[in-house]
């Protein structure tokens, strides 16, 4: 196990170095890719370094570990004669976290080096997966949480798909929602121009997919996902309205509004009762209060453990030392990804968040400069944003399936957002211009 942890860093660096320095295609040698790989390298590197064994006398004086001195001394004096401890306060949890980081990195690299057809197939698979999750969620509610369709420890009769936690179910759908809505908007703005083919059927398809994903989010009763999805939907609509080649067309604005209305109608038709119950639930205040206590205690722990942190993935093992008496039960995660990464990695967490912020800035800048050619890269970036917002009140990236979809979307944005383009404020509208979703995989547009 220790060998696996130590191999994570050199293996990652070898793959990352190949991609950034020598690997094709040229379009992935961008600041966003470099900063994303840097962030992943920090996770793998700091996580591996915390497996370094130190003499117990040295370990005891590390930040945040003095209260465990008696336990450490007893381990040394016991018959097993243990005289060294790794820096991380939960080696097994750190090893599991390293495996997750390594797997997520593999997904990221695989999407980077894939061709356009492979990425199209990936997006289609993810959307199909999202629809399946929603249908399973509907079945869970219709059958009253029957064991044949509900995970054993769900503890509720709500839509959760294949997830135990309904928030993670909602996180997945929130990430996929902008992709479906982008395809819907693109089809809606082209259907009236050329109704001779199957565009009306495609429009109905994307309205249905978008409506189902929205309904699934509502059925989850995850209020944090509601907020994240609403923000992303507003940004999606604003991007299409503000796109310069569509700015002058009042009809197209109406098509966007109509598409949003159709999606909202389907979602509310399926799940309006759950929306009312979730928003008006008195337990919402209690839930937010508990999360606020977790965040506050997490910050205190992060300061006490700084600059080394407790070790990647070790929050659940260490947090009870900082847990207030008002917060009952076992708390495995901070329910705030940003606090938890600082708690576990300390100064390394600051480096990770800085690299992630720079990658985000680079992608956002490219997205803003290429509003004339809205496409799948923009949708993927907004999908990743949905999870980043949800992460303020939950722990979605600790769930492998959710983390893999997130890294795939970030990689998709890195590859498919156009490079080096600027907005042309008076670009004329044309049929070619409206085909904004039809992008090549090298970061350029077919227009």
Image: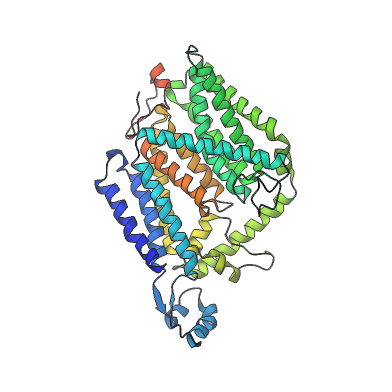
Residue located 48% across and 11% down the image = 196
What residue occupies the far left of the structure in this picture? 22
Residue located 27% across and 41% down the image = 24
The answer to whether residue 201 shows anywhere in this view is yes
* Residue 105, x across and y down, in percent: 39, 51
Residue located 54% across and 36% down the image = 177
Residue located 35% across and 60% down the image = 9
In this rendered view, identify the residue nearer to me: 207 or 244: 207
* Left or right of residue 377: residue 152: right
* Residue 37, x across and y down, in percent: 36, 51
Image quarter hosting the N terminus:
bottom left
* Residue 337, x across and y down, in percent: 53, 55
Q: Is residue 170 above or below residue 75?
A: above
What residue occupies the far front of the structure in this picture? 148
Q: Is residue 418 above or below residue 47?
A: above
* Left or right of residue 75: residue 32: left
- Residue 327 lies in quadrant: bottom right
Q: Is residue 218 above or below residue 392?
A: above
In this rendered view, identify the residue nearer to me: 391 or 6: 6
Image quarter hosting the C terminus:
top left
* Residue 403, x across and y down, in percent: 49, 49
């Amino acid at each position: 196990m220790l060998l696996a942890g130590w191999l994570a860093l050199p293996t990652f660096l070898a793959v990352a170095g190949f991609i950034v320095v020598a690997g094709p295609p040229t379009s992935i040698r961008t600041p966003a890719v470099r900063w994303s790989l840097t962030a992943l390298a920090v996770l793998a590197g700091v996580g591996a370094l915390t497996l370094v064994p130190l003499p117990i006398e040295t370990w005891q004086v590390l930040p945040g570990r003095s209260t465990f001195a008696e336990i450490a001394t007893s381990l040394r004096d016991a018959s097993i004669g243990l005289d060294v401890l790794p820096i991380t306060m939960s080696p097994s949890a750190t090893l599991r976290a390293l495996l997750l980081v390594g797997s997520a990195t593999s997904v990221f690299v695989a999407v980077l080096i894939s061709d356009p057809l492979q990425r199209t197939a990936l997006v289609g698979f993810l959307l199909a997966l999202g629809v399946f999750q929603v249908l399973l969620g509907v079945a869970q509610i219709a059958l009253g949480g029957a064991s044949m369709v509900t995970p054993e420890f769900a503890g509720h009769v709500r839509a959760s798909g294949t997830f135990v936690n309904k928030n993670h179910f909602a996180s997945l759908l929130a990430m996929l929602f902008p992709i479906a809505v982008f395809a819907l908007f693109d089809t809606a703005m082209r259907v009236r121009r050329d109704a001779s083919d199957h565009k009306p059927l495609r429009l109905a398809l994307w309205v249905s997919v978008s409506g189902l994903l929205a309904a699934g989010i509502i059925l989850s009763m995850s209020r944090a996902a509601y907020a994240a999805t609403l923000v992303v939907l507003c940004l999606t609509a604003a991007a299409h309205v503000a796109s310069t080649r569509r700015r002058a067309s009042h009809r197209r604005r109406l098509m966007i509004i109509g598409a949003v209305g159709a999606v909202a109608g389907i979602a509310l038709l399926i799940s309006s009762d759950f929306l009312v119950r979730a928003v008006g639930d008195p337990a919402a205040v209690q839930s937010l209060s508990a999360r606020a206590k977790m965040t506050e205690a997490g910050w205190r722990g992060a300061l006490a453990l700084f600059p080394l942190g407790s070790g990647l993935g070790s929050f659940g093992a260490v947090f009870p030392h900082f847990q207030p008496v008002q917060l009952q039960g076992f708390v495995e995660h901070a329910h705030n990804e940003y606090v938890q990464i600082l708690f576990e990695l300390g100064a390394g967490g600051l480096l990770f968040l800085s690299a992630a912020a720079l990658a985000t800035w680079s992608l956002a800048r490219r997205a803003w400069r290429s509003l004339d050619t809205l496409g799948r890269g923009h949708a993927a970036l907004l999908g990743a944003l949905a999870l980043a917002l949800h992460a303020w009140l939950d722990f979605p990236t600790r769930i492998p399936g959710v983390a893999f979809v997130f890294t795939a979307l970030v990689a998709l944005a890195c590859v498919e957002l156009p490079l080096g383009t600027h907005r042309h404020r008076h670009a004329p509208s044309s049929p070619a211009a409206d085909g904004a979703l039809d992008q090549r995989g090298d970061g350029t547009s077919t227009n």
